[in-house]
């Protein structure tokens, strides 16, 4: 792929820096009740092929699922599936583990709760058809294939969210904005660059004042705050590769290690060394 194609792909930098790993944990016909707890950094993706079940969660939300449906909880929220005791529900379920819990744009890009009948997602049909065929078979390597297919479903959800847009301020709304999206992409592609407000406004093709106001309205953050959080999250990815701290700071645009440490602690809540010692990255 050419550098121009990479630079014009709004999801490319996101998917390069932030891993989301799916882990299949159930396929089959569910009868009765099952609970999914709220665990930091863990999401749940459920695909119902058929049957009947009630979905409930800790907010008091409740709905009946009676047709093939995609359910995704992008952020920690306890929820339950109460399958019909007579017909049950044919399900394929996976947990999704997100890196960088303090700020993971993949998790933040999607609503807390997504429930979509598959009939409303025709572009997903080839993928979900393949996933269901694999889920309800006993082929060699089935677990590994399904893990990868669930990860592709997540990418398709991001594509769909970007195409559909968002009514609420946030990452997807900003990335889908004709002008603000260009500034976000510029930051994503080159976090090491010493971006000024004027340069970002120029990327967006806007005046500095108009850019600042529109960015806050679309993304629900100032350009400076967003850039800091993006840089720190990229730094976390580099630290997981055991890159030396000084080099990491330079790679994400900090001339001063002290400045980098302040930014890291502001976003993550602690300094890089104890963060790595806790097992978030290699020691």
Image (tube, rainbow, N blue to C red):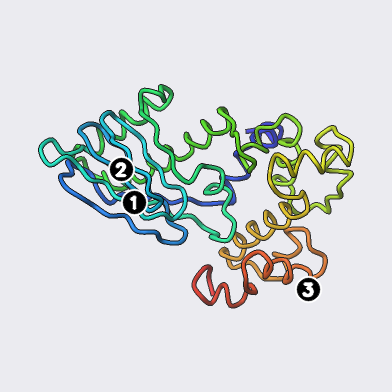
**What is the crowding at mark 3: few (fewer than 14 residues within 10 Å), some, or many (at least 20)?**
few
Lower sequence index among marks 3 and 1:
1
User: Which of pointers 3 and 1 indicates the residue nearer the eye?
Assistant: 1
Q: Which residue is mark 3?
A: 258
Question: Is 93 situated left or right of 139 in this image?
Answer: right
User: Which of pointers 3 and 2 indicates the residue nearer the eye?
Assistant: 2
Q: Which residue is mark 1?
A: 79
Question: Is 132 situated left or right of 112 in this image?
Answer: left
Residue 251 image point, x, y percent: 73, 59
Lower sequence index among marks 3 and 2:
2
Q: Secondary structure at mark 3?
A: helix
Q: Which residue is mark 2?
A: 55
**What is the crowding at mark 2: few (fewer than 14 residues within 10 Å), some, or many (at least 20)?**
some
Residue 43 image point, x, y percent: 42, 51
Residue 29 image point, x, y percent: 17, 41
Give the spatial CA distance, label 3 vs label 1: 42 Å
Question: Is 238 situated left or right of 84 in this image?
Answer: right
- Give the camera-side residue of 141 and 237: 237
- Give the camera-side residue of 132 and 178: 178
């Amino acid at each position: 792929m050419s550098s121009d194609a990479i630079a014009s792909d709004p999801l490319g930098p996101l998917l390069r820096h932030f891993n989301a790993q799916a882990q299949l944990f159930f396929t089959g016909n569910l009868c009765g009740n099952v609970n999914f707890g709220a665990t930091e950094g863990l999401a749940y993706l459920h695909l119902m092929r058929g049957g009947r079940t009630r979905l409930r969660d800790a907010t008091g939300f409740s709905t009946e699922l009676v047709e093939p449906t995609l359910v995704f909880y992008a952020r920690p929220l306890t929820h339950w599936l109460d399958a019909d005791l007579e017909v049950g529900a044919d399900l394929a379920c996976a947990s999704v583990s997100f890196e960088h819990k303090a700020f993971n744009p993949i998790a933040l890009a999607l609503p807390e709760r997504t429930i979509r009948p598959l009939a409303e997602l025709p572009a997903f049909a080839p993928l979900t058809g393949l996933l269901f065929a694999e889920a309800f078979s006993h082929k060699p390597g089935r677990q590994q294939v399904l893990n990868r297919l669930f990860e592709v479903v997540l990418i398709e959800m991001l594509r769909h969210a970007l195409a559909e847009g968002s009514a609420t301020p946030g990452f997807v709304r900003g990335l889908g904005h004709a002008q603000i999206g260009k500034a976000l992409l510029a930051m994503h592609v080159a976090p090491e660059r010493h971006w000024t407000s004027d340069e970002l406004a120029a990327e967006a093709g806007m005046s500095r004042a108009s850019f600042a106001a529109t960015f806050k309205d679309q993304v629900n953050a100032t350009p400076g705050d967003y850039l800091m959080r993006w840089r720190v999250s990229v730094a976390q990815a580099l630290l997981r590769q055991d890159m030396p701290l000084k080099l990491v700071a330079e790679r994400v645009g900090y001339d001063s290690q002290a400045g980098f440490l302040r930014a890291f602690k502001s976003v993550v809540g602690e300094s890089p060394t104890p963060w790595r010692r806790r097992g978030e990255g290699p020691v």
